[in-house]
Amino acid sequence: PSPPKPTLLYLPGFDGTLLSPFLQLPSLSQTYDVIGITAPPSDRTPYKTYTSLVASYVSSLDSDVYVVGESFGCLLACGACRDVEVKGLALVNPATSYPGSKLKVALDGLCEGPGWRHAGGMAAMLPLFGDGYQLDSLVSMIKSEALPEVIDDRTKESYMGRVAFGLGGKLPYLDRGCVRWRKERWLEEGCRA
């Protein structure tokens, strides 16, 4: 029998989904037992409680644990891993600079502005989460001119197709109350901690 795989715990960003790492999950699962935590829009767990829950979960695992946090997940990872032993910690696009960011300005306007512009305001923030290469890559994929680099065999291509076609029903709509909660109780509290 082969030795048990180490655990890779993925902590999501502000959206609370596994959308960002979904293309990497098949490759990562060859080396790690990948576990991803998600948070539906109705989740109102305060930052400190969330960090305690994650720390308790990490402590309960009977394997080496690597923690990957993305954006808000980085704040959560830093808070949760202060008092527990992990084998590794990776921070991807950390929200540690949130107080001085364009995202803070956008979220403040979104939460304080009229409710009717919420959906358009959410869409207008999308450029804050990408870089100059992502749009070109997405257009190439849509035109069937290229696949992402991590999709290098038929199994991974099939996985991407199954997941991508099911995303429409799985992506949460973050209503104004959810956005305000996550802004104040996750991002702002997490940065203060």
Image (spheres, grey):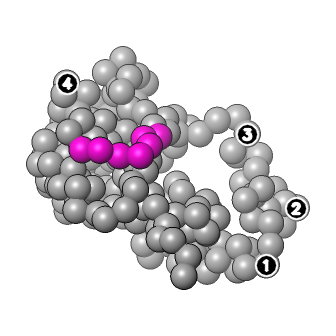
Indicate the secondary structure of the residue bearing disc 3. Answer: loop
> Left or right of 15: which side holds 137?
right
> In which quadrant will I find the C terminus?
top left
Residue 106: give x, y in percent of width and height. 37, 31
Residue 87: give x, y in percent of width and height. 41, 46
Q: CA distance from mark 3 to mark 1?
A: 25 Å
Indicate the secondary structure of the residue bearing disc 4. Answer: helix
Q: Mark 2 or mark 1, which is nearer the start of the sequence? A: 2
Image quadrant in which you'd find residue 155 = bottom right
Query: Pointer 1: residues within 10 angstroms few (<14), some, or many (20+)?
Result: few
Residue at coordinates 21% horizontally, 50% vertically from top-left?
A: 55
Give the residue at mark 4.
192
Indicate the secondary structure of the residue bearing disc 1. Answer: helix
Residue kind at label 3, given as amino acid type: Tyr
Give the residue at mark 3.
133
Q: Mark 3 or mark 2, which is nearer the start of the sequence? A: 3
Image quadrant in which you'd find residue 188 = top left
Give the residue at mark 1.
154
